[in-house]
Amino acid sequence: MDEPDATVRRRLQSDEIAWLTTVRPDGTPHVTPVWFVVDRSTWWVGCNATSVKVRNCRTQPAVALALDGGRAPVVAEGVATVLTCGFPAGVVALFDRKYGWDVEADDGSGPRALIEVAATRWLFRGTAR
């Protein structure tokens, strides 16, 4: 699998919102904006451990992530794994650096989770790679 090029890597570091698509138990898509970081070809999404996206990833791990911007779309497809403890320190640091957010901290909405998405396919500027 190809790694993202320099332009895409810059966007992955600077864009604040990605759109995560998961699959509901009935087979319909669930699309939601998320905060994310990327380390090499792995996307990390921080969220509430009881969220719909977490429930969906546990039953159907095939997901897609997309950055806004129709002129140069960035889409990654992959397989999700949900972590509810033992968050990698490097990933926690990336969230803090990008958003000033402690992804592990309970913000009053309940326990936290990280969704790890190993990208299996990248689409850049409308071209599948």
Image (cartoon, grey):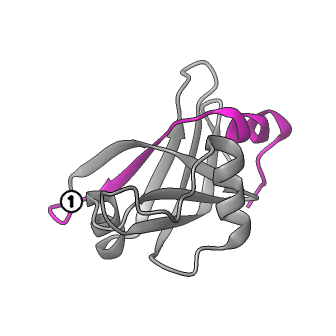
Figure quadrant of residue 3 = bottom right
Q: How many discs appear?
A: 1
Q: Is residue 12 left or right of residue 85?
A: right
Neighbourhood count class around disc 1 (C-alpha, 10 Å): few under 14, some 14–19, many 20 upward:
few
Q: Nearer the viewer, residue 107 or 81?
A: 107
49 part of magenta stretch: no
The residue under label 1 is 27
Residue at image point 47% right, 52% down: 64
Q: Which residues are magenta?
A: 1-26
Q: Residue furthest front?
A: 108
- Secondary element under disc 1, as helix, strand or loop, is loop
Quadrant containing the N terminus in the rendered view: bottom right
Tell me if residue 18 is in the magenta stretch: yes
Image coords of residue 124 (percent x, y): 66, 37
Q: Is residue 116 left or right of residue 59?
A: right
Q: Residue at x 56, y 23 (%)?
A: 69
Tell me residue 2's x, y (percent).
Answer: 77, 55
Q: The residue under label 1 is which amino acid type?
A: Gly
The answer to whether residue 123 is above or below residue 119 is above
Residue at the far right in the pictured view: 6
Toward the bottom, the furthest residue is: 86
Q: Is residue 96 above or below residue 118?
A: above
Tell me residue 34's x, y (percent): 45, 45
Work out whether residue 37 or residue 119 is closer to the camera in this orientation and state it: 37
Q: Please tell me which residue is depicted at 41% across the width and 63% down the height of the picture.
A: 106
Residue 108 shown left or right of residue 120 in the figure: left
Which quadrant of the figure has residue 126? top right
Residue at (42, 64) in percent of width and height: 62
Q: Determine whether 51 is above or below 16 in the image.
A: below
The single residue placed furthest to the left in the displayed view is 26
